[in-house]
Amino acid sequence: MKEVTFEESVFSSIVAKVTLIILAVLFFLVSIDLVITALSGSLNFINENLLSNALNPFVGLFLGLLVTAIIQSSSTTSTMVVALVASGTLSLEEAVPIIMGANVGTTLTSTIVALGFISNKRAFRRAVAVGTIHDFYNIILVLILFPLEHYYGFLSGVSFYFSELLYGSGISEALPHTDNVLGSGLTNQFVLWVNNSVLILIISFGFLFVSIKLLTWIIKKTIIGESKNRLQSFVFGKPIQSFSWGVLLTAAIQSSSVTTSILVPLAAADKIKLRNAFTFIIGANVGTTLTALIAAGFRSEAAATIAIAHLLFNLTGVVIFMSLPILRKLLVHFVKEFSYAIAKYRVIGLAYIIIMFFLLPFLLISLNRNLDRPVNKKHEATVSQRF
């Protein structure tokens, strides 16, 4: 009987670990797709009754946050927005705040994953720090860019300019394809087989919860094991190194929710430092826009313009935080203090999620619903001519 060499054993172990991670990620993505399919009726209601009337930019911002927090898919929110812009229901200026809100709403996944460590105080504190730094990073970008967009049309104007460079004066009528290629066939067959909307909704959320727990467990067992030191030096080394891996891995997986959630168990086990995780998250925010940008270029001018606006939003964060290390240090320090408070009084963590991602957006949408929107007439007229 042939003896297995050390090299063959190491290779087989690596293959097995990579296979497990890939299968877990696929299960996670299919679970997300199933949730989206199960919520299709709600999405249609949101599309027809909420997004189509989001004339006030504050309403658009918090709608994007609330909808994405509920369905946990910023790509789905973006797809609906692109369709509405391309059909003329929304102007580009009205759509950009929704995209900003979606960027914040999608950070909820990693924060929820952090709650899985609530039984261990020290691990919970480290996990919360990584989960919430993603939240606060995007919130800061919104605080910076929303006023610029609201009063000066910064993102919509620049993205419109680049879209014109790509398309010239022609207007493509094609709308983006909204199916998830990976999971749509499986989920459609499952929906047809079950044929009960309530049961499908229950099962889909169950699958999503199980997929997150499974992904967390596999990452802990495979990456945090013997390879933890190599992972720390190879992926989470210098800031530019962490940033680059964040861009590449997220662009490959096409989900910032997955890549940022992977950081949570690593941080909980004290295998990566918060400052290194932060630069990885900055890169992940950029990486999640690249695939949509490439895909949008082959579909419509409206899709490309929204994708460019999304990319510009995240590139602004790169310029600000990667070029000014002092800002990164300040945010890391603030999040550490915040995580200490949550670890000491754990009810704060649950209250933070409920208020930040659900209650506050809902209340602000209700309060701002009837406000008149101050507009830049010249810029809006230019946008309306194009879309």
Image (spheres, grey):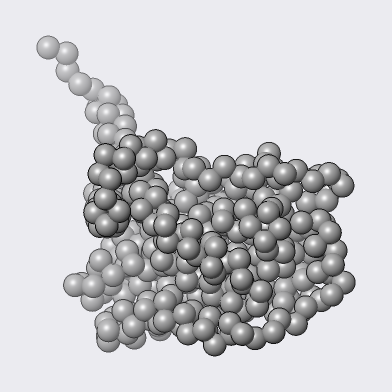
Q: Is residue 382 left or right of residue 305?
A: right
Number of numbered callouts drawn:
0
For the N terminus, the image quarter is top left
Q: Position of residue 237 (x, y in %)?
A: 48, 56
Q: Height in image: 14 above or below 84?
A: above
Q: Is residue 284 left or right of residue 321?
A: left
Q: Position of residue 285 (x, y in %)?
A: 55, 59
Q: Is residue 207 left or right of residue 255?
A: left
Viewer-closest of 142 and 222: 142
Residue 353 visible in the current orientation = yes
Viewer-closest of 87 and 304: 87
Q: Residue at x 32, y 44 (%)?
A: 191
Residue 319 visible in the current orientation = no
Q: Position of residue 179 (x, y in %)?
A: 49, 43
Q: Residue at x 28, y 45 (%)?
A: 195
Q: Residue at x 30, y 53 (%)?
A: 197
For the C terminus, the image quarter is bottom right
